[in-house]
Image: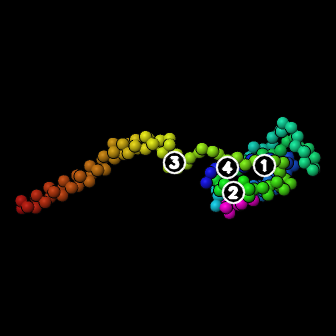
Amino acid sequence: MPPYDCMLLFKPHVEKEALIDLVTRVGKHVYRRNGVVTDIKSYGMIHLGYGIKKLDGRFYQGQMMQLSMMATPQINKELHYLNKEDRLLRWLLVKHRNTSFGLDFLAEEGGQELSKFSEMRTLDGGDEDDDDDDGDDEYEVNEEENKVN
């Protein structure tokens, strides 16, 4: 699943409870579609470079929130219900491109570094192997002592 950022610009007079309610609804929608919300950021009240005209007036400031998520590519079409939300001035969904995670990230960036980990383990972990060998030597010595007696 590719990562997305959803930017939400709320009207300035929207109360905190209503703001959290809409963010929760978006998060639940993503979760129902087998997605994951990874981060939520609030940028607080911001001043806009130009006024945004809505039915109830023109707004020159707003409250901005960012939801970072990993979701299916259909999430763009599924979030269009936000167009009818009267608490929002604007919303934008941005898809991160050419990002890799997990083993893909390690293979691209640190393929050589993974071999260093195994080299470090053999250098530091040699004591563990020596303990096993010492145990075997002691066993062989004990067998020789038993044969002599």
Residue appearing at x 10%, y 61% in the figure:
146
Spatial separation of the CA atoms under disc 2 and disc 1: 16 Å
Spatial separation of the CA atoms under disc 1 and disc 3: 31 Å
The numbered disc on residue 91 is: 1
Q: Nearer the viewer, residue 104 or 140?
A: 104
Residue carrying label 3: 104
Which residues fall within the magenta stretch? 24-33
Colour basis? rainbow
Does residue 31 appear left or right of residue 111 in this picture? right
Q: Look at the numbered disc 3 and give the secondary structure of its residue.
A: helix
Q: Look at the numbered disc 2 and give the secondary structure of its residue.
A: loop
Does residue 11 appear left or right of residue 27 in this picture? right
Q: Nearer the viewer, residue 81 or 132?
A: 81
Q: Callout 1: few (<14), some (14-19), or many (20+) C-alpha neighbours within 10 Å?
A: some
Name the residue type under label 4. Tyr
- Tell me whether circle 4 and circle 2 mark residues in contact (CB < 8 Å): no
The numbered disc on residue 37 is: none
Q: Could you tell which of marks 3 and 2 lies nearer the N-terminus?
A: 2
Residue carrying label 2: 74
- Displayed quadrant of residue 142: bottom left
Spatial separation of the CA atoms under disc 1 and disc 4: 13 Å
* Residue 10, image x, y percentages: 82, 49
Mark 4 or 2: in front is: 2
Quarter placement of the N terminus: bottom right
